[in-house]
Image (cartoon, rainbow, N blue to C red):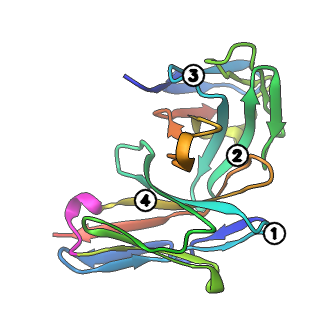
Amino acid sequence: AQKVTQAQTEISVVEKEDVTLDCVYETRDTTYYLFWYKQPPSGELVFLIRRNSFDEQNEISGRYSWNFQKSTSSFNFTITASQVVDSAVYFCALRPNTGNQFYFGTGTSLTVIP
Amino acid sequence: EAQVTQNPRYLITVTGKKLTVTCSQNMNHEYMSWYRQDPGLGLRQIYYSMNVEVTDKGDVPEGYKVSRKEKRNFPLILESPSPNQTSLYFCASRLMRVAGGRERGQYFGPGTRLTVL
């Protein structure tokens, strides 16, 4: 099965707190690609990161960091020192190497309270 | 400016009245796709196309048709819309092959909010 699970439906944090958004995936493929997208209240979908299955190096971009662990099939996203502008729905997505279909999780709605 | 455009942005229609949502991209991307977004269900892929005249079903193709006659356009057709097709629709495009493997993922259009009464 090809599937992405984002078990956290909604999260609220107070500004400046750190927050981690969980993403667990299932795929039959040994090669695959993982993505995170942000959907702010305005509704557009913004690409954040893409990770290959053969590259387990974690990545940091400013206050954002991503932890990819093949052993647990997880690709978690951490926001450090959260800000109100981080309030959005965040989607994790999977594209197996065989085929060209994308599989999205159900999203996590993050609210950062000032 | 690199972009994916969708029209209309908002549409209210009645059951059974055929409609088309247009999608166009100016980035010469081979891959185009349609998604629907519903509360609690995330984004689900309806159809995708890897090039002109090549289309494939996604997870929820029932009730929808697509065509890819030109590389830049990928319209979504609802021949006989029903209330369960009320949703937010997104079109997306991407390059199939990126030099150095630096795939950037998909570029999404602004969305079309469809209501079927």
On the picture, is A63 further left or further right than B60?
left
- Identify the residue position indicated by label 2 in the image: B45
What chain does badge 3 belong to?
B
At a point 18% along the width and 74% down the height, the residue shown is A15
Q: In the drawing, what numbered circle is on residue A89? A: 4
Q: Is residue A76 shown left or right of residue A113?
A: right
- Disc 3 and disc 2: Cα gap in Å? 21 Å
Foreground mark, 1 or 4, reads 1
* Residue A63: image location, x then y, percent: 25, 68
As drawn, the residue found furthest toward the bottom would be A71
Residue with the mark numbered 3: B28
Q: CA distance from mark 3 to mark 4?
A: 29 Å
Of the 4 image quadrants, the one containing the C terminus of chain A is bottom left
| Residue at image location 68% in from the left, 19% down from the top | B20
Real-space Cα separation, disc 1 to disc 4, in angstroms: 27 Å
Q: Quadrant of the N terminus of chain A?
A: bottom right
The amino acid on which the numbered mark 1 sits, given as a three-letter code, is Arg
Of circles 3 and 4, which is in front?
3
Quick check: A60 above or below B54? below
Q: Secondary structure at mark 4?
A: strand
Mark 3 is on which residue type? Asn
Rounded to the nearest whole Å, what is the CA distance between mark 2 and mark 4?
18 Å
Q: The residue tagged with tag 2: helix, strand or loop? A: strand
Same subunit, labels 1 and 2: the answer reads no
Q: Residues within 10 Å of mark 4 (few under 14, many from 20)?
A: many
- At x 59% / y 48%, what residue is drawn? B37
Residue range of the region highlighted in magenta in the rendering: A81-86
In three-dimensional space, the C-alpha distance between marks 1 and 3, rounded to whole angstroms, equals 31 Å
Q: Residue at x 63, y 85 (%)?
A: A72
